[in-house]
Image (cartoon, rainbow, N blue to C red):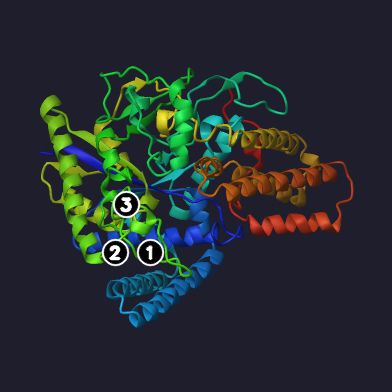
Amino acid sequence: MTKGYFSFVLHNHLPYVLAHGRWPHGTDWLSEATAETYLPLLRAMNELVEEGYKPKLTIGLSPVLCEQLADSSFKNEFVGYVNQKIKAAQHDSEEFYKYDQHQMLANSQMWEKFYGLTLDHFNNIGHDIIFEFRKLQDAGYLEIITCGATHGYYPLLSRDESLQAQTKMAVKNYENHFGRKPRGIWLPECAYRPRYNWTPPVPINGQQLTYPRKGVDEFLTENGIEFFLIDSPLLKGGKSIGVYIDRFEALKLLWGQFEKQYSPRKEEFDKTPREAYLVSSSTEGKMPVAIFTRDPETGLLVWSGEHGYPGDGHYLDFHKKRFPGGLRYWAVTSAKSDLADKVEYHHESALERTVENSGHFAGKIIDILTGYHQETGQAGILVAPYDAELFGHWWFEGPLFLKRVLKGICANENVELTFLSEHLERTKPTRVISIPEGSWGQGNHHYIWLNQHNDWTWKHIYESEAKMCELARFWNEHEDRRDHVLEDILKQMIRELMLMSASDWQFLISTFSARDYAELRLTEHYEDFKRLSKIVEKKIDGKEITPGEWQFFDDCKNRDKLFTDVEIKWFAGVEFPH
């Protein structure tokens, strides 16, 4: 008899970087994540299937990532990137051989083999990563969930129309790529806001207003989304453990400023992460949405670079790279080691550590679930959600760890792997609860995405949201003024607004990890949006549009070409108003 269920959930996302630089920030990010995370995850899943297992992994693929992986320009870029890495490894091998650096030579040969296999894999699947994920889902080995279209931070966007567009585009994009409707969503940054009278944190066009807002849950249920994930303090209170704070020194400093203002909710002991609940903040009798809660006990074992498995001294160090090729040859050594003190990496030793670490993690899951069953007589669920890029990109050995954990659970007679939608059908939760506003950042609030370093970004976003809604309403109300040219320009404005709204920019500004790039990207999308809006207004007023303005529009359309089927009406008004 099954005593519990386990669900590994990996969220795959990168902001739109195509045609927006290459290195150090730009398409190389996408190529790195593809080589080190997306393809290794596919290999791990297919290997498990070939070995006779049914791994049942839940994968979140953000719509903006799907658009990039399906883009032909990325596919060509990635082949060039991998060939460059192979040449870098060969160059390093020549030098290590010449200087009798035997372990470094073994590592450079490891990289040449790794990237050679990566290129073979990419070629063998016809460069179609999305289709490979789709095949695994169609065969019942994978559940794919969606995300806000461009990873907009739902609680801080100023217009319900923006939440509507992020959600509707997500559903439409999922259908385009996977041939069915999504059942679940990873809300960007796991950030949720219920219905209430909301005051923007910064003025909108110089005005500070308070006005009623729909709850995030309402947009999900209106669009057929059945479940989303939250952090445990949003369910039951208590102290939160941020998922990023161990990895970015800048966040520790920023959190120090907010910590004095933070008072954790008193813990509620009548709720548990072992159960699914229903959430509704609507008073209109809408169908509630189910929530699954991140397990607090196992989270740090993987998330923490200092206290978790990725901090094991044998594993490949993420930070120290050898230039000009940018390959990594050193081990973590210890969490406190300076880059100068890192020792040479030994691949075989690192692989051996995944055996112990995966065994410990699987054992912890089994102990927690069997313990809960003994206490309650119920078969509970343990949900372990992570950013997918942690597995392979940040933690090179992560995909092998993941594969071994899934094998360990498959082999256990007391605990079963499950999809979240499958668990909903199995348990049919009926208890409807309210949860507070929050995210999975430290303190469960918005300080990473709203602070003195990035509050200016919201002024630009709020101004643009208001203008977009104004022009979309004009389009909706004046059928006689419509034509294909006006439609094309308005749709490009929507793309620029949605790209401007990505939560990645505020995160990168707060962490200082790519601050200049993030500030530049958001500002560029804002300026492009404003210039496009002036072209629209000239067209509406019957004024002549100059050749330079037409060229600018064409350049925007060719550069930011995602979401070809975005709809203007999403910004003209909410489908189900208050």
**Residue 438 seen:** yes
Asked which quadrant contains residue 50, the reply is bottom left
> Residue furthest toward the front?
340
Using the numbered discs, state the Cα–Cα distance from disc 3 to disc 1 in whole angstroms.
31 Å
Quick one: SS at disc 3? Answer: strand
**Horizontal placement of 216 versus 332: left or right?**
right
**Residue 229 image position (x, y, % from top left):** 37, 35
Residue at horizontal 42 percent and vertical 62 percent from the top: 321
Quick one: SS at disc 2? Answer: loop
> Residue 345 bears which disc, if any?
2
Quarter of the picture holding the N terminus: top left
Quick one: SS at disc 1? Answer: loop
User: Does residue 481 sit above or below 556 in this rendering?
Assistant: above
Q: Amino acid at mark 3?
A: Leu
Q: Are marks 2 and 1 in contact (CB under 8 Å)?
A: yes
**Horizontal placement of 16 versus 434: left or right?**
right
**Callout 2 crowding tier (Cα within 10 Å): few <14, some 14–19, many ≥20:** many
Residue at horizontal 30 percent and vertical 61 percent from the top: 343
Residue at image mark 3: 142
Of badges 3 and 1, the one in the foreground is 1
Using the numbered discs, state the Cα–Cα distance from disc 2 to disc 3 in whole angstroms.
33 Å
N-terminal label among 3 and 1: 3
N-terminal label among 2 and 1: 1
**Residue 236 image position (x, y, % from top left):** 32, 23
Of badges 2 and 3, the one in the foreground is 2
Between 407 and 362, the residue placed more toward the observer is 362
Residue at image mark 1: 328
